[in-house]
Image (cartoon, rainbow, N blue to C red):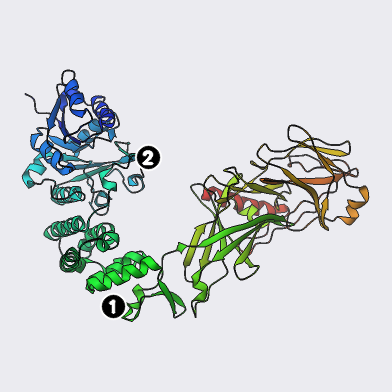
Amino acid sequence: MTTPTISIVTPTYNCQPLLQECLESVFNQTLPQSEIEIIVVDDGSTDGTWDYLQSLRGEHPNLKALRQENSGKPSVGRNRGLAAATGEFVFFLDSDDWFSPEALERMVAAAREHESDVVVALAVGDNRTVRQASYLKTIYDADVLDDGAWRTLSPWKLFRTSLVRRLGVEFPEDMVQGEDQVFVAQCYLAAGKVTTLADYDYYHLRGREDGGNVSKQRQSLRNKLLTTTRMAEIIVANTEPGRRRQRFFHRVIFRTLAPGLGKPFMTAPADEQEEFLSRIQREVLTSMGCDDLAAARDKSRLRLAVAREGTVAQLTDLNHQLAAGPSYVAENGRLHFDLGPELNALVPVELRQVTDTAKLNHSFEGLGSTANGLAIIYRIQTPLTEVPGLALLPPVMELTTRGTSPVTVSVAGKALDDQRWQFDVGAELLPQAPTVPVVWDAHLVLSDGSGRLGSSRASYPRIQDATQARAVALQSPEDGAATYLEAYSTTHGSLSVRQGGGPKFTAVMVSHYGDGDLRLTLPGNSGKLRAAALLTAHGRLQLEHELLADDQLVVRQPGASTITADSTPAMDHGVPPFVLEVECERTSSQVPLILADGKLVPLKLKAAGQKPPAGAVAAPTTQHHDHNRASPKGGGLSGLLDRLRRLKRHALRR
């Protein structure tokens, strides 16, 4: 019998519908079925899996079905399938995942052409976050550390069977999780050549809605100990002391060990805690790089610093403090954790400095319009205000554009009282946009000047699960066209601001004007009408209005004496001279107006060569002043050069 090119080993337990999709992806490969050996190991399923496998044997003679009593461990099924494999290569395919059609043909071709012992092919997620696309590239002779292979120690890879046989490696059967790391690490470090492929979506990882992925189950402290100490043994046996060895240990310590120092440690019996701490101090933490520890996230850094030299009682004390909410102290003007005399003496001061951004507790208080734009009010509460000697800066609202080249603009808060802050978002935002229309996502940030101490996505609650929105109309400082800033609540109840030539959620359409009244069509999601008012340089004027059927609103023109051009000069900061504001239960929108022949008419977007209506009184040209940018010039060579510079900046951002 001809030796198969590749053996596919698939352990399975009680997931027959997913197994069917999995095997169909193997049957549909472009690599001929005569070159594929499929070995499925049924771990005592009770859902009809075995009968399904038997039904396939007539149509698919390359399928081998093996059955065993339930072990509850994927490693047992993988080892049995590996022992039965006869292919030149072997691939471990989980029964809830699947291949793209050309996956096997492409992997085998790369391994043969480049004489690779291991091929790491790009995996993507289905209802599951997989980040390989962010770091994996196609490299035929890859460095395991530098080229990303060490970041993925899962078994979903192509292995040359002769390498596996020569090493005599198997998946440890006394481990529920982490057994794949031990297997893959040995193959990586013994391979003559490792190839990484990122030119195709080879492998699809399914996130099961029932939470049945074994990798998502919580690990015991004993399993953490087995994973970290066995990985440490492999690394020490295959590397020389120095920085490269520390880099191999980095993944083991910070991704595998550190999470075990929290809940798994606290819920383990006392004798397991003692053994765990004693062994990791001797076998693992001696290889931890000082710079790596200093760069770790706060909780991991503190736990590792205590675990490195401390006792079970001291690590337990630290975990209790972190769970209850740590205390803080200012040292040299910077925020530090105050862990009490004993732990403060154990953990050096530089490792106790707060570097993570904590969630900033806040509540939405209100969103309104002012003469200059949007006024957004939040109540911000933080215990950091009670830390003596800590100089907090006023909170900032950071607005960041969506897209591949984000731009961030910061708006400083103005204190209304001890806890309430107002953030004014207006015309200063307009020229910063890389493109229009654009959406800005809002975050609230608290800092002491050395870095972020607190940050949260700004909330904007939805009303009865419906979008809440408010729009203001401004004039672009560059061309005088009407521009909208529209704050709205996202589906997750967060605040975003849309900048564009017209509102999206609050669009009030002017359907008729010119006979003394303005007829408007309200948005369907607006809710109950509350008010219609004219905003001028001198204040807010309530207007008579009538609500008709089909969301139609008729607004009466104010008296001519109240809106004469002489008494209503244009507003500053790029705001149109007259604005009609229509406020409803869930939306509030504005319509920019100008005065034409004694009547208020809509201010339309500028078009090339378009002239304003006869007798129109428009706002004078205003210049936008920003300390970070040169003011735009009105014309001539300097104006042309300034516009070209802006276009170049915007092109680079894209």
Judging depth in this view, the residue of 73 and 172 nearest the camera is 73
Name the amino acid, label 1: Leu
Helix, strand or loop at mark 1: helix
Q: Residues within 10 Å of mark 2 (few under 14, many from 20)?
A: few
Q: Is residue 569 left or right of residue 68?
A: right
- Residue 362 visible in the shown view: yes
Residue picked out by circle 2: 127
Q: Marks 2 and 1, how far apart in space?
A: 43 Å
Q: Is residue 532 left or right of residue 121?
A: right
At horizontal 21% and vertical 67% (from top left) the residue drawn is: 285
Residue picked out by circle 1: 346
> Is residue 102 shown above or below 438?
above
Judging depth in this view, the residue of 4 and 600 nearest the camera is 600
Name the amino acid, label 2: Asn
Q: Position of residue 553 (x, y in %)?
A: 78, 38
Q: Position of residue 396 (x, y in %)?
A: 57, 63
Judging depth in this view, the residue of 509 and 623 nearest the camera is 509
